[in-house]
Amino acid sequence: MRSVTDVWTVLVILGLAVITVVTRSLFFISSKPWQLPHWAQRGLQYAPNTALATVIVPELVMTHGQLMPGWQDARLFAALAGAAWFLTHRAQRQAVLGTIVMGMAVYLPLHLALGWWKPHWAVLGQGFRMAWPCLLLCQCGCSRGGYAHQEIKRV
């Protein structure tokens, strides 16, 4: 005998499938072409830039959920170098690739040679000998716990 939960799960999945098919096929049901208003077309032009900014900006100005404590962060200088490269070379075909290469060319020396933007485990002190498993397994900023975090706490 099936439980009520299984029936509800199946009904929810089928309902979501129907909603998805109907909303995605609305453009094909009509016989006349659809025309978005001018304001909507203009707003959609900015959607990719806005989505990219919402992903990148918090990563640049925050460290582990806190605003950066200082200006010695390799990510910030790499982003500025990459943006400068893109703005000066955007007419060329390989502007995006050049942006990535320029950003990494600035980031790596600052991060590796000068030690700017050390991960949370490197700043916390000598008692964290098990820090590499934490960095490799979770990368969550020590806010959620997990196996690697429990190992670090025992050291």
Image (cartoon, rainbow, N blue to C red):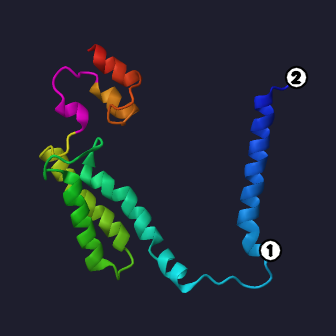
Q: Secondary structure at mark 1?
A: helix
The residue that mark 1 highlights is 29
Q: Where on the picture, by quarter, is residue 143?
A: top left
Amino acid at pointer 1? Ile
User: Does residue 18 appear left or right of residue 95 in this picture?
Assistant: right
16 in magenta: no
Q: Secondary structure at mark 2?
A: loop
Where residue 58 sits: x, y (%)? 32, 53
| Magenta segment main secondary structure | loop
Where residue 7 sits: x, y (%)? 81, 34
Residue that appears at 34% across and 18% down: 151
In the rendered view, would you say 46 is above or below 72? below
The residue that mark 2 highlights is 1
Amino acid at pointer 2? Met
Crowding near the residue tagged with mark 2, few <14, some 14–19, many ≥20 C-alpha atoms within 10 Å: few
- Magenta-colored span: 119-130
